[in-house]
Image (cartoon, rainbow, N blue to C red):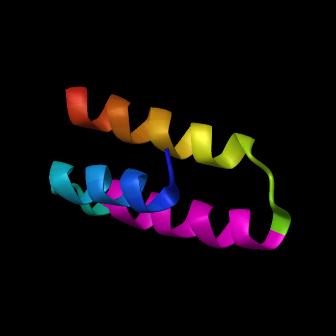
């Protein structure tokens, strides 16, 4: 899964916090390259989507 896919899912939730979170994590990932950030963003969006 890519950050584009995670962002699409965040946008689909309609939750502004999910969108902002994914955007911030994407920026951090760009700087650090840490692959765990993508997994964290994806898991967070899934949790938000189920609430």
Identified at 49% across, 68% down, the residue is 23
Location of residue 4 in the rendering, given as x and y in whole percent from the top left corner: 42, 62
Direction from residue 13 to residue 6 in the image, left or right: right
Q: Nearer the viewer, residue 27 or 17?
A: 27
Direction from residue 28 to residue 22 in the image, left or right: left
Secondary structure, magenta segment, majority class = helix
Q: Nearer the viewer, residue 43 or 2?
A: 2
Q: Nearer the viewer, residue 15 or 29?
A: 29
Is residue 24 within the magenta segment? yes
Q: Is residue 24 above or below residue 46?
A: below
Q: Quadrant of residue 39?
A: top right
Identified at 37% across, 41% down, the residue is 45
Quarter of the image with the C terminus in it: top left
Count of marks overlaid on the render? 0
Location of residue 24 in the rendering, given as x and y in whole percent from the top left corner: 56, 68
Location of residue 9 in the rendering, given as x and y in whole percent from the top left corner: 28, 49
Q: Quadrant of residue 47?
A: top left
Direction from residue 15 to residue 20 in the image, left or right: right
Q: Quadrant of residue 29?
A: bottom right
In the displayed image of the protein, which residue is found farthest to the front?
A: 1
Is residue 6 within the magenta segment? no
Which stretch is magenta? Answer: 17-31
Q: Is residue 41 visible?
A: yes
Q: Is residue 51 visible?
A: no
Q: Is residue 47 above or below residue 6?
A: above
Identified at 60% across, 60% down, the residue is 25
């Amino acid at each position: 899964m890519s950050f584009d896919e995670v962002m699409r899912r965040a946008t689909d939730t309609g939750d502004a916090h999910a969108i902002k979170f994914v955007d911030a994590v994407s920026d951090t990932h760009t700087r650090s390259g840490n692959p765990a950030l993508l997994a964290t963003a994806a898991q967070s969006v899934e949790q938000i989507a189920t609430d």
